[in-house]
Amino acid sequence: MFMNKSCNAAQRLVRICLSMGVLLCTSQVFAQAAYPNKPVRFFVPFTAGSGTDIVARTVADVMSKSLGQPVLIENRPGAGGTIAAAQVAKSEPDGYTILVHSSGHALNPSIYPNLPYDTVKDLLGVTPIAALPNVMVVSPARGWKSVSDVVAAAKAAPGQLNYASAGMGSATHLNAEKFKLQAGIDAVHVPFKGTPEALSDVIGGRNDWFFAPLSSALPLIKDGKLQALAVSTAQRSPTLPQVPTTLEAGVSGSDYVFWVGMLVPSATPTPIVKRLHDEVIKALALADVKDKLNRLGAEPMPMSPESFNAFIKTEMDSAAKIAKAAGLKGS
């Protein structure tokens, strides 16, 4: 009889534990199904009006409707995007704090020796959003009409010309460094907190050139405030079909693609990662979003989270080689 009572008690305990487990799992499912139930924040590592910011806002407008919650843009510029990346990496992995970064994300670990986060372990890629060309722009007052003119001026005065970027370790910085290496020229890097500030200095003649995101530079090119000399991609941009690529301009191996992607803290639950991924993919399939991106010279760049994370590692390897060859080091 004692044994039967013990067995019955044990069985009741097992049933209680199983019931608690089912309730716990059910509550987790409901919690995930309820996502999102408050505003979502996109942390953008550059100032408003930068290429990354424009792409982020294009997707955020659509996602705020499909998610049923406001998607807020928070610009956190500085240190090539590492300030914003660190904030997101250390945030609660609940899908409410999201990083929208550029391809400079892959360069940062090579030039900042003391990053407060691990690029691979602490941040998880959701999907790239778009790829867009950078465009080499100069002030019309310079009188340069081609990439060859810039290269000739730089070789005639080594270390005397300067070039702008959206920050140390940004995609615009990496693009310029790759160009310098391939062109065999020396010039001084002048980093800014974002693209608009860099563009302003080039227009004012205080910086000689800038590989600017086409999305940001296009209005100024059309207004005649900037002269477009070349695009960074391997093929010409349909948005500026008359402008050659840097490859066509004679600088072999100088092509570069600026991409913008979405990342979250690595511990973010898989169902939330999938929801965010699916919402971005749905947004990129909309004719209105495609049209907006095309007018910016950008193209949708959808990938699965697995493919994107593998892509980031490949980009990190490529960026590390450029950083080493150029001797790049952040503070």
Image: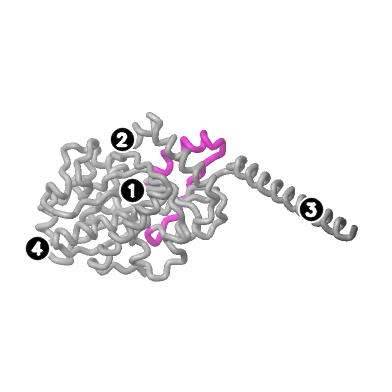
Q: Residue at x 52, y 51 (%)?
A: 97
Q: Residue at x 20, y 57 (%)?
A: 179
Look at mark 1 in the image and give the residue it sits on: 259
Most common secondary structure along the magenta stretch: helix
Please tell me the numbered disc located at residue 11: 3
Q: Which residues are magenta?
A: 51-80
Give the x, y percent position of residue 173: 29, 58
Closest to the camera, between mark 3 and mark 4, is: 3
Give the x, y percent position of residue 40: 54, 45
- Whether residue 54 is visible, yes or no, is no
Q: Amino acid at mark 4?
A: Ala
Q: Secondary structure at mark 4?
A: helix
Q: Residue at x 43, y 35 (%)?
A: 283
- Could you tell me which quadrant the N terminus lies in? bottom right
The reply to whether dot 2 and dot 3 touch (C-beta < 8 Å) is no
Look at mark 2 in the image and give the residue it sits on: 294
The reply to whether dot 3 and dot 1 touch (C-beta < 8 Å) is no
How far is mark 2 from mark 4, CA to CA? 38 Å
Q: Earlier in the sequence, mark 3 or mark 4?
A: 3
Q: Earlier in the sequence, mark 3 or mark 1?
A: 3
Please tell me the numbered disc located at residue 156: 4
| Residue 270 falls inside the magenta stretch | no
- Could you tell me which quadrant the C terminus lies in? bottom left
Q: Amino acid at mark 2?
A: Asn
Please tell me the numbered disc located at residue 312: none
Q: Residue at x 76, y 53 (%)?
A: 14
Residue 185 falls in image quadrant: bottom left
Q: Earlier in the sequence, mark 2 or mark 4?
A: 4
How far is mark 2 from mark 1, CA to CA? 14 Å
